[in-house]
Image (spheres, rainbow, N blue to C red):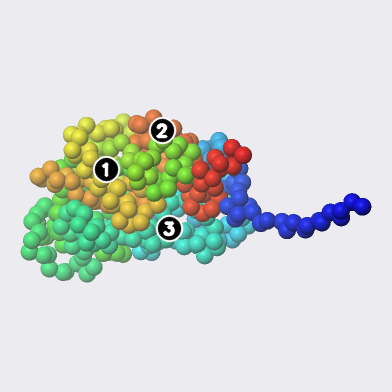
Amino acid sequence: MAKEQKTETVEPVAEPVAVRKMKRYWRVAVIANIKDDDQPHPPGVPDDAYADFDHIETIHKLQAALESDGHETKFLMADRSLPAAVLEYQPDICFNIAEGLGGDAREAQVPALLEMLQIPYTGSRVMTNAISLDKTFTKRIWRDRNLPVAPFQEFAQGDEPLRAEFKFPLFVKPSREGTGMGVDTKAIVKNDSELRERVNYVIQNYQQPALVETFLSGREFTVGILGRADSKLYSRHPEWYDDKDGFHRLPILELDSSRSVTPQVYSKAAKSKDVGEEGAPDFTCPAIVEPDLEKKLKHLAWRAHTTLNALDISRSDIRLDEDGNPRLIEINTLPGLTPDYSDLCLQAAAEGIAYNDLILDILCLAAGRWGLLEPREIALKANKR
């Protein structure tokens, strides 16, 4: 008599979360604030308000880049309609370049909303975006971590005594703005009378403290940083990233404002000019610098990025003092992404990185840390089976 075969019930094994969430294509919401050059500003709002908002053409370029890899995209305006729009569209991930709608941490508004809704997004998270917009707070952190910054002082009332160690000329700007807002040739002040006039102008017109710092008379550079420690696991181009620390330093871009509409000052007026247009700064990328200075500039940009816990992308501005020593000016954790115009895009292009590849890598790096992509080594093992 044949032996009775024993049958076993096999319980299904749940797939790992990363595998269950895996999609080849995603629904991507592109979130931004759009500028309308024809729309008048409300009363009491400075003329250069909204200067860091994006043109709709930039959004279309971003969408085209994302769609080139098969993703579905939809543009969502970063205004009061955003919470409902995000819930209605239900994106897998958001490509965030929104500047926010006011307040002292406006660039953190969209990340905070998406965190609350538990929706993945690109770039740095809430705290970093809040801190990096506050130039004074950022400089305090850098200074405490022994990073080189010019001597600085914040004026909240306008009548604070100037610290004794300062020597004119000084440079005055809003403490919580970007894109050259509140900056023109009058930002360089040569005596106490000019200082008080400019400080009060900033406080009254921008409703925020004025940042006063030693005027740096040397060459000006900007350096882009991509990636993080595990970039190679999620990037579409792992060869871009350093084997030791996972970061990529883009070529250094030098800005020469000597012949711009605002000599010596990289102002909003200068930034609004197209590359090569009369009155625009001269851009040189890669910058012609000695190897030792190149190493210092790239290291400072990396330190500026990592000290603030920035993620995946940033661009740091650095200027030399009268003795040729580099000093960090500020960091932009939401750098402009307009092709053939924004500094970071010019740096990428100088290295031969295509715009579509740059945008898709920013997306994939974010997707990796939010669990939408398997690490490369796991995916490779799966493909070999």
Between 362 and 277, the one nearer to me in the picture: 362
- Alpha-carbon span between mark 1 and mark 3: 23 Å
Q: Position of residue 30 (x, y in %)?
A: 52, 48
Residue for badge 2: 353
Q: What's under tag 3, amino acid-wise?
A: Arg
Residue for badge 3: 125
Q: Residue at x 14, y 46 (%)?
A: 325
Q: Secondary structure at mark 1?
A: helix
Q: Is disc 3 surrounded by few (<14), some (14 to 19) or many (20+) residues within 10 Å?
A: many
Whether residue 133 is visible here, answered yes or no, is no
Whether residue 193 is visible here, answered yes or no, is yes
- Alpha-carbon span between mark 2 and mark 1: 18 Å
Up-down relation of residue 249 to residue 352 (above or below): below
Q: Position of residue 161 (x, y in %)?
A: 12, 68
Q: Is disc 1 surrounded by few (<14), some (14 to 19) or many (20+) residues within 10 Å?
A: many
Q: What's under tag 2, amino acid-wise?
A: Ile
Q: Position of residue 348 (x, y in %)?
A: 37, 36
Q: Residue at x 49, y 38 (%)?
A: 236
Q: Residue at x 48, y 49 (%)?
A: 366
Q: Position of residue 214 (x, y in %)?
A: 14, 54
Up-down relation of residue 179 to residue 106 (above or below): above
Does label 1 or label 3 sit earlier along the sequence? 3
Does label 2 or label 1 sit earlier along the sequence? 1
Does label 2 or label 3 sit earlier along the sequence? 3
Up-down relation of residue 21 to residue 382 (above or below): below
Residue for badge 1: 298
